[in-house]
Image (cartoon, helix red, strand yellow):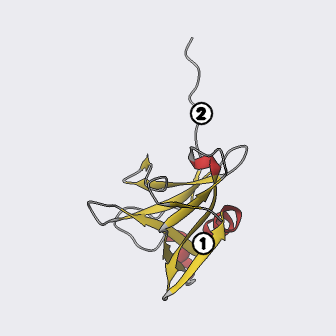
Amino acid sequence: MARASKRTKVVGVARAGRRVPPATAAIGRSYVERAVNYIAMSRMGRGHEDITAIGGTFDGKTWTMPIAEAITDIRAARCFYYTVGFYSGEKRYLAVVEGKRPYLRARSDGKWNDNLLGQPCIDL
């Protein structure tokens, strides 16, 4: 007997071809988009679950944010984070993967990808 597949709830993903998520557009709230240029991981980190912080530059200033804060921003539709595809140059928005411990992962065209893990890793 085959086991039922585990469904993953995705929060905060902008739909392909739209820059403004529908819920945000409907209520007319403003939001911010920030490009993620680097990540920080726990000492033994290898996967998305081990990312502890993200960061980049915004308005000419460098920023670093703990994952918990970024997850809160995405859930509240205050800020959307993305990576940029190396070859295509297109935005890959980060989404919250719900589970025992929520984490961020990039999505493109409805599919998960490893663009976030492809960012340079720094020590905090």
Q: Which residue is mark 2?
A: 6
Residue 106 disc label: none
User: How far across and how far down the image is residue 63, in percent?
Assistant: 59, 78
Q: Residue furthest left?
A: 87
Q: Which amino acid, by three-letter code, is at mark 2?
A: Lys
Q: Position of residue 96 (x, y in %)?
A: 60, 56
Which residue is identified by label 1?
A: 77
Q: Residues within 10 Å of mark 2 (few under 14, many from 20)?
A: few
Name the quarter where the N terminus is drawn.
top right
Pick whichever, 113 or 41, lies toward us: 41
Q: Residues within 10 Å of mark 1 (few under 14, many from 20)?
A: many
Q: Is residue 16 above or below residue 31?
A: above
* Type of amino acid at the residue the image marks with label 1: Ala
Sequence-wise first label, 1 or 2? 2
Q: Position of residue 100 (x, y in %)?
A: 73, 43
- Locate the C terminus by quadrant: bottom right
Q: CA distance from mark 1 to mark 2?
A: 26 Å
Secondary element at image label 2: loop
Give the residue drawn at x 69%, y 68%. 69
- Residue 106 versus residue 59: which sits nearer the camera? 59
In this rendering, is residue 24 above or below 43? Answer: below
Q: On the picture, is 18 further left or further right than 77?
A: left
Residue 14 visible here? yes
Q: Is residue 42 above or below residue 7?
A: below
Element assignment for label 1:
loop
| Horizontal side of residue 82 vs 9, given as left or right | left
Please tell me which residue is depicted at 31% across the width and 61% down the height of the picture: 86
Q: Is residue 114 left or right of residue 76?
A: left
Which residue extends farthest right? 100
